[in-house]
Image (spheres, rainbow, N blue to C red):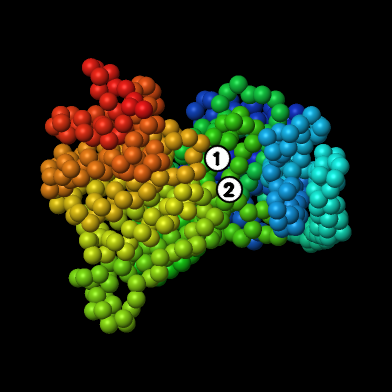
Amino acid sequence: QSAFLSDGAVAQVQGCLRTIFRPSSQSQQSQQSQSSSQGAGKDRAEGTKIKLSLKTAKAAAAANNNASSMFPDLPADDSEFERKMLQRVLKKAINDMKEHDPQGLFLNPVTDAIAPGYSKIIATPMCIRAMEEKMMSSAYKSIDEYKDDTLLMFANCCKYNVGPAGQWFRNEANRQKKLWKEGILQEAKSKWKDETAKRKRALKRAPKPPPPLAFAPGKKTEKTAAAAAATTTESRAKEANEDAAINNLTADDVRPLPPWKYKRRKTEIDVPSMQCLASMLLADPFVVRVLTDRVQKILRVDVLKAKRVPAGHPILPSLFQLLNIARLSTQLCALKGRQCYIPDAGLRQILTEGEDFHPSYESTRNYLPLFSKLLLDANLDRRMAAGGDLHEAALQNIVTTPELPADEWRGTSQLHDLRAIVEGSFVNLLQPGNSNEASLPHQFPRFVAALEQLSGGNMLYERSFFASLTHALLKYKSKLSHGTRDLVTGCMIDWLKIERVDSRKTVLCSPLHECFMNLLNEWSSLGNLVLPKDLFLSLAEEAAAASSRVEVGQRCKKFAKLWAGDDDSFLAVKEQYLRMLSGTPDARAREWKEKIGIVDEGEEMQVDN
């Protein structure tokens, strides 16, 4: 209700997740455990609350210093480690193959358009990209399977490229095959052998797993299944009085959930998965907004002002872990609850040798300090601008403006959580009172450069961001500076000029196009002081030209075609343009339509070819 997530609330959410994402131990698969599990399910159906026993947890931790996880250790056959280790070894091998193929001959799939008749000659095509996808999805169960695919790839090349015309391709295939067989393959086998032996030695020296904690229901305890089934309501009430419930957890109990992953039995279940439901609740847009807002506030208030590092904050890892679980909700639903997953927190825990990296972890581990630097640079820009406490020092070159980041954010296009946080901070910067006309020209490009990399250069579908941006800018009302207005309009028009799209229709019908025209209409309603009518029509013409990928002044045929065709996907954008034209004199409106390429004939709009 207050749109704020307290530290105690984070602890309570984690307590619920510890209960919901409980492991399915091997003992539960026996007949005795099945009856016990049925009894527990019956108790819950009758309304018994699941309690979190902090006393038992602390006693277990005191008995064993390694009792930091509520989840069981690795499986007896160590299959999870072997999967991750094989993935790591093959990832290195595939990257080496890319380096030995500078022309990209084997990188992408071969189509009939590139090589006529290829599909008729080659029954089983193979390329480096296909092997990389199989590696990422853990389709390879051994190095031999990877070896077979690689040999098949080289054999396909020699089979298709016959005769004198294919001599160069055969030579190149044989060259790369020799380098791979003598170097890359041998190195992968050696690495796999060494790491497997090292892992076996480590397991022999490893201590015994800690006893189960009281808040992991379904795990085997000292009580037998029969005794558990015979537990009376009175004893359960006594236990509830002695133990602390989830609702009594406080900020002192906030600790990142241990990373955990397991597969459920193969039998299909008709009832909804609790893991899926929990993840879907976390994935609610309002909850995600509250989480990201809390992350931003922690960074601005606790981390930067206290001159701390993000990894040292007690709450940040848990917040990012909740965001990651929210992102996994669609995957859990797609798997119908058969695979339950809690990601690593990303800051406190360090991946051990043999584990693979994950984009969500890298966002917190590698790029969160970079986001802190972005906020610090923006604050320094404000202090160095006219009216700031460092303005005189800046004039004397005692302090200099931080350089605009060039490649710092490269490779972050998959970090959706971090993109939402940067977008939120960008909107916060543009709120009245958080910046000024002197410093904004330096601050604005920093956030734009970060968003360009975080979005992969595609900001077409960030409707929530643009809606929030519009709301923030309209708070200025008639006091909006022309400098801020020009920065925003210029940036959004540049985003409309994106080249990496399947068709220009995608851009013309995008939320970015619609939100940009809506922002112009709102500004125009505030009067000519904010957005004069001539400038409004000029910006609308630039937007239509940028979306159609033509120069300003040329006919926008694709725009005019959508206008005349009554395409449903274009209706929202068209409504914004009609809103603009309704407040424009008829002669000026007809002139604007002619520039775009739209001609009125009665009530119908036709394209002027």
Q: Is residue 128 left or right of residue 589?
A: right
Quadrant assignment, res 289: top left
Q: On the image, numbered disc 1 is attached to which residue?
A: 328
Residue 372 x %, y %: 42, 63
Residue 397 x %, y %: 31, 81
Q: Is residue 61 left or right of residue 399?
A: right
Name the image quarter holding the C terminus: top left
Vertical placement of residue 108 versus 569, above or below: below
Task: Identify the residue shown where x is 14% and y is 52%.
Answer: 479
Quadrant assignment, res 261: top right
Name the image quarter holding the N terminus: top left
Say the numbered circle drawn on residue 343: 2
Tags 2 and 1 in contact by the CB under 8 Å rule?
yes
Residue 477 x %, y %: 16, 47
Q: Residues within 10 Å of mark 1 (few under 14, many from 20)?
A: many
Determine the secondary structure under disc 1.
loop
